[in-house]
Image (cartoon, rainbow, N blue to C red):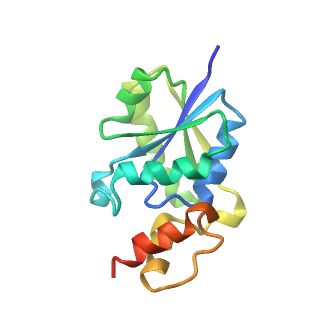
Amino acid sequence: MNRIAVCPGSFDPVTNGHIDIIKRASSMFDKVIVLVMYNARKNGGTLPVEERAELIRRCVDGMPNVAVDFYGGLLADYVKMNGVCAIVKGLRAVSDFEDEFQQALANKKLAPDVETVFAVTSSEYMYLSSSVVREICRYGGDISGFVPDVIREDIVKKYSSET
């Protein structure tokens, strides 16, 4: 049996906190798909989804059971089309839970055979979010330790030009 999980998100940009959840999911499932999604509530994102997916691919290079994809439709449709058994979502704080729980219930209704698994972030990343990284970049701050080294310079170039 091939247990496939998906780690969905906007990843605008991917952070070390995201990578932590992806690594942990990859140890629990046979295959993990990191799914970059278009999020209309976040105005579509700063970078195109294809570019975000490429940055993530560079970060997960060397993780043999991790793939990266992007999608603009319903997560429930994607999981059904791709034989996914679980959706893995990271939680930083209690405030994340309410929205994630609501999404999990909607996904369960639309894709009853797919479970949502919540992974609590490692304590060193509890403060970290993509919006924090974007804000630091806008003002020329150092994002070392916030994003994977392999994409740090790319993130600085792409997000510091927003000012």
Residue 134: x percent and y percent? Answer: 44, 72
User: Residue 12 appears in which quarter of the rendering?
Assistant: bottom left
Q: Residue at x 57, y 26 (%)?
A: 4
Instruction: Give the percent coordinates (x, y) of residue 44.
Output: 29, 56
- Farthest residue to the top: give it: 1
In the image, 100 versus 6, the foreground residue is: 6
Which image quarter is the N terminus in? top right
- The answer to whether residue 9 of the structure is visible from this angle is yes
Residue name at image x 62 percent, y 18 percent: 2
Identify the residue at horizontal 58%, vertical 81% (top origin).
Answer: 142
Residue 52 position within the rendered picture, expressed as x and y whole percent measured from the top left? 43, 54
Frontmost residue, 92 versus 71: 71
Residue 67 lies, with reference to residue 146, above or below; the image says: above
Residue 122 placement: quadrant: bottom right
Residue 120 at least partly seen: no
Q: Is residue 70 above or below residue 160?
A: above
Q: Looking at the figure, which quarter contains the C terminus? A: bottom left
Rendered view: 67 above or below 130: above
| Residue 60 horizontal/vertical position (percent) | 61, 47
